[in-house]
Amino acid sequence: MLAGRAIFLIAFLALWQAAVAYGFADPAFVSSPTSIVEAFWKLVEDGDLAPNLLTTLVEIMISFALSVVLGIASALVLDRSDWLNRILSPFLTAFNSMPRIALGPLFILWFGIGIASKVVLAVSLGYFIMLLSTLGGLKNVDRDLLLMSRLFGASELRLFRDVRLPWALPSIFAGLRLTLIYCSGGAVIGEMIAAQSGLGLLVQSFSGRFDVASVMALILVVAFLVMALTALMDWVERRLLEWSKGSTDVPG
């Protein structure tokens, strides 16, 4: 698997480099891999990358944490109250359908050009994903298993700990991955609208100078950052799913 991925990546980069070198792709619009690497090292040497990367990473992690906490907490409340779920469902659908990116300038106006506005924009994207994935996982628990557990005298707390939560974990982790991606995109897009620092600000700056190589280098930095965070999440998921497999027996 790893060897196959490496071969594919090398072949892709070679074809990309050749396409630019032999004029099949216009370097004014698509930079070659070597030009992107050179632009990346220039960002590192000039000291532009590290502080802006840190700003974006802080925004992503804060917005991700808030989206996860608020989304899971809201899902738990709505799962416990069908009445409240029916009342709020149309409003949640309406809010979720709003074009949050179009609201970005308003968030900048309301919360300033600092980190707060980027976090709010990212949370507005990530919260609903976390809410819906968690709620869906909790609602899809095997009803026969719940009934059998209650017949054996399991308390609601134990039902949640030993049945509902382990059963919902795959759906929750699917939501976590999407939430991370959307929070990352929201933070960078917010920085592109207006910011004091961040990778999105650099992208906007280099785009204005038509520096395609630097723009593509920054896009790849964001992509690799999200890949690294997702890999860490996958590792945590494997550990938790190992626990959940031993926790879905009927509690008595």
Image: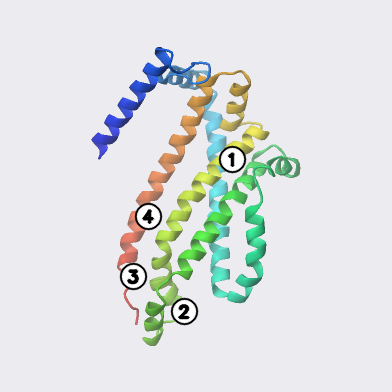
In which quadrant will I find the C terminus?
Answer: bottom left
Question: Under tag 2, what secondary structure?
Answer: helix
Q: Which residue is mark 1?
A: 187
Indicate the quadrant where residue 88 lies. Answer: bottom right
Q: Quadrant of the N terminus?
A: top left
Mark 3, residues whose alpha carbon is within 10 Å: few (<14), some, or many (≥20)?
Answer: some
Of callouts 4 and 1, the N-terminal one = 1
185 up-or-down from 124: above or below: above
Task: Identify residue type, mark 4.
Answer: Glu
Would residue 166 be seen by someone viewing this image from the given angle? yes
Q: Is residue 79 above or below residue 112?
A: below
Query: Counting residues from the N terminus, which is met first, the one under dot 3 or under dot 1?
Result: 1
| Left or right, residue 197 beside residue 247 | right
On screen, residue 86 above or below 178: below
Label 4: element kind: helix
What kind of residue is marked 3? Ser
Query: Picture coordinates of residue 69 (x, y %)?
Result: 55, 58
Query: Disc 1 residue type?
Result: Ala
Quote the CA–CA distance across marks 3 and 1: 37 Å
| Residue on which disc 2 sits | 156
Estimate how packed mark 1 is, as few (under 14), some (14 to 19) or many (20 or more) residues with alpha carbons within 10 Å. Answer: many
- Looking at the rendered structure, which numbered label has been put on residue 237? 4
Residue type highlighted by circle 2:
Glu
Spatial CA span between label 4 and label 3: 15 Å
